Image (cartoon, rainbow, N blue to C red):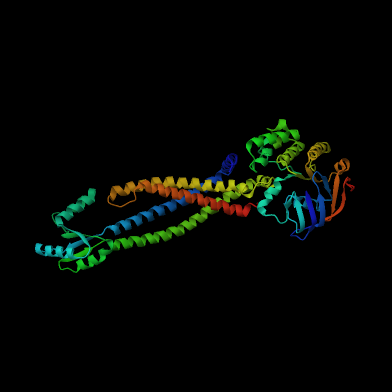
């Protein structure tokens, strides 16, 4: 599903964010990416949906050769991925339904399919009854659930989440993790960068720890491993 | 393109025009003014071209005779003219007929002739037509050498002058067109830049969920084309009424002036202006997208 060989990322400023990273993530994995700020976590995540390109090395995501692909093929790589951010990134002037439907409209999905799929994912995240609300009328947790609905509405193979619970209180965070768990059980690979020690320790999933651009630990059922 | 997609694009453009209403208004205004000026030049050049070629196609030579010529001498001249190569017809016009024609042509202003009283300053003349325009010059030169002929005139110098002026106007119009088009493209690209800025969040999300570059670009391109198109329509409509008013004025004072008839001429000019507006709009948004939309 995700295959990295000797992946390096050096930014134009000269900062080395990732240094010869090797990793394989298989279908159905649930992976936490942990590490201090500036360790290379964000870069790792950004490489996966080609927000950044590796400086060298081999990177394959969902069957696409990310390094050598044509720029015009990038949209098709991203259609197989669902990306979720710490700050939700919803469109404030669109309703919950419209925000989720937007992800299908812009890849020119048929209208009837949009109606059906949006309702289905709003069911999954438990926001079916709030489909008419605007993001400003929702709590942070609800907004993040809309963002998750938008990320999974096109049925991606991999969900990539960058600190999805970073702005949420612990209880709300568990609601979000519950949704991720259910998505994962349904067969979707999940890669989630996080700072949340409790979540990582409790869920006992695969943990990849990054420090100074190196993978220092990769455990099948790990804990956060740092004192915070 | 799917129906729902076209609907989406159209809705996006309308929202955008509304959101940037002042900037949209300014863009449309600039396009309209620029295209109007271009349209004025276009109609002027086309009219002068027509005038010149119409004069050129009049293959008539006016042969003015010296005063008090004997009738027998006139007959000899007529025969000599007929003997030339390529002559189609020769018609004698005496001075009375000439002044009568002039009076008719002046129409409302025929009182001007009253000042002459009983005197008739016009000479007797022959009207000579030739079979081909190319023969006009040689025929006129031969006729002028005949004794008793004061002058043999044809429209050539006027035609050449008109073509000269038309050429100048064309160059001037082209320079003006480049400048105005430049200004128009600049303001349209600025408007589109504002739209891109207002939509940067949506653009980012569209990229994350895998919208193609062209799907993202289309609404912006369309917005530029719509701005240019509306400007073009305004310019075409104003130019149309302007031309109608000018034509009415010209016809009322210079009846025989060979102006382009309003239809279908102004329809063609209108379509040309509209298409230019849309092209200018497309260029303007393309420039903006190249610079500000990293897809």
Q: Nearer the viewer, residue B244 or A205?
A: A205
- Above or below for A63 versus B121: above
Is any atom of residue B187 visible in this view? no
Q: Nearer the viewer, residue B219 or B150?
A: B219
Q: Residue B169 appears in which quarter of the rendering?
A: bottom left
Q: Residue at x 44, y 50 (%)?
A: B272
In the image, farthest residue toward the top: A129
- Residue B177 is left or right of residue A124, and the answer is left
Q: Nearer the viewer, residue A65 or A103?
A: A65
Residue B269 rendering spot, x and y as whole percentages: 41, 50
Q: How many marks?
A: 0
- Above or below for A224 versus B159: above
Q: Residue A179 appears in which quarter of the rendering?
A: top right
- Residue A225 is left or right of residue A123, and the answer is right
- Residue B238 is left or right of residue B56, and the answer is right
Residue A167 rendering spot, x and y as whole percentages: 79, 42
Is any atom of residue B276 visible in this view? yes
Residue B52 rendering spot, x and y as whole percentages: 32, 58
Q: Nearer the viewer, residue B109 or B59?
A: B59
Residue B156 rendering spot, x and y as whole percentages: 28, 63
For the N terminus of chain B, which image quadrant?
Answer: top right
């Amino acid at each position: 599903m995700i295959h990295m060989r000797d992946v390096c990322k050096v930014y134009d400023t000269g900062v080395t964010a990732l240094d010869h990273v090797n990793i394989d993530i298989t279908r159905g994995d649930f992976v936490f990416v942990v590490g201090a700020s500036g360790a290379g976590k964000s870069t790792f995540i950004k490489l996966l949906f080609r927000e950044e390109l590796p400086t060298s090395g081999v990177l394959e995501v969902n069957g696409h050769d990310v390094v050598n692909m044509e720029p015009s093929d990038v949209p098709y790589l991203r259609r197989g991925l669902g990306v979720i951010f710490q700050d939700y990134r919803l469109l404030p002037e669109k309703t919950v339904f419209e925000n989720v439907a937007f992800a299908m409209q812009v890849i020119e999905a048929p209208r009837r399919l949009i109606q059906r799929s949006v309702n289905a994912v709003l069911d999954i995240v438990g926001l079916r009854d709030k489909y008419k609300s605007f993001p400003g009328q929702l709590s942070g947790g609800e907004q993040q659930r809309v963002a998750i609905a938008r990320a999974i509405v096109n049925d991606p193979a991999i969900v990539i989440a960058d600190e999805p619970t970073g702005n949420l209180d612990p209880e709300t965070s568990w609601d979000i993790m519950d949704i991720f768990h259910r998505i994962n059980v349904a067969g979707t690979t999940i890669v989630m960068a996080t700072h949340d020690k409790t979540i990582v320790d409790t869920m006992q999933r695969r943990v990849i720890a990054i420090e100074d651009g190196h993978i220092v630990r990769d455990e099948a059922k790990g804990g956060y491993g740092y004192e915070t | 393109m799917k129906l729902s997609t076209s609907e989406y694009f159209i809705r996006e453009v309308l929202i955008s025009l509304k959101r940037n209403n002042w900037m949209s208004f300014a863009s449309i205004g600039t396009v309209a003014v620029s295209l109007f000026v271009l349209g004025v030049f276009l109609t002027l050049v086309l009219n002068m071209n027509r005038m010149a070629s119409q004069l050129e196609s009049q293959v008539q030579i006016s042969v003015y005779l010296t005063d008090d010529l004997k009738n027998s001498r006139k007959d000899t001249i007529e025969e000599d003219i007929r003997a030339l190569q390529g002559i189609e017809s020769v018609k004698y016009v005496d001075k009375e007929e000439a002044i009568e024609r002039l009076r008719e042509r002046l129409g409302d202003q025929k009182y001007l002739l009253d000042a002459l009283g009983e005197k008739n300053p016009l000479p007797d003349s022959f009207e000579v037509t030739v079979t081909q325009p190319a023969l006009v010059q040689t025929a006129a030169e031969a006729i002028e050498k005949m004794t008793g002929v004061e002058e043999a005139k044809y429209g050539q110098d006027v035609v050449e002058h008109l073509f000269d002026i038309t050429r100048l106007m064309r160059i001037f119009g082209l320079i003006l067109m480049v400048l105005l088009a430049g200004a128009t493209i600049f303001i349209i690209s600025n408007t589109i830049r504002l739209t891109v800025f207002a939509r940067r969040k949506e653009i980012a999300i569209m990229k994350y969920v895998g919208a193609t570059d062209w799907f993202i670009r289309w609404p912006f391109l369309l917005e530029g084309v719509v701005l240019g198109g509306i400007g073009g329509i305004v310019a075409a409509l104003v130019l149309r009424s302007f031309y109608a008013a000018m034509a009415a004025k010209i016809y009322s004072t210079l009846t025989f002036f060979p102006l382009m008839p309003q239809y279908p001429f102004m329809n063609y000019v209108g379509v040309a202006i509209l298409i230019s507006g849309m092209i200018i709009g497309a260029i303007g948004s393309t420039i903006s997208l190249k610079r500000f939309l990293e897809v």
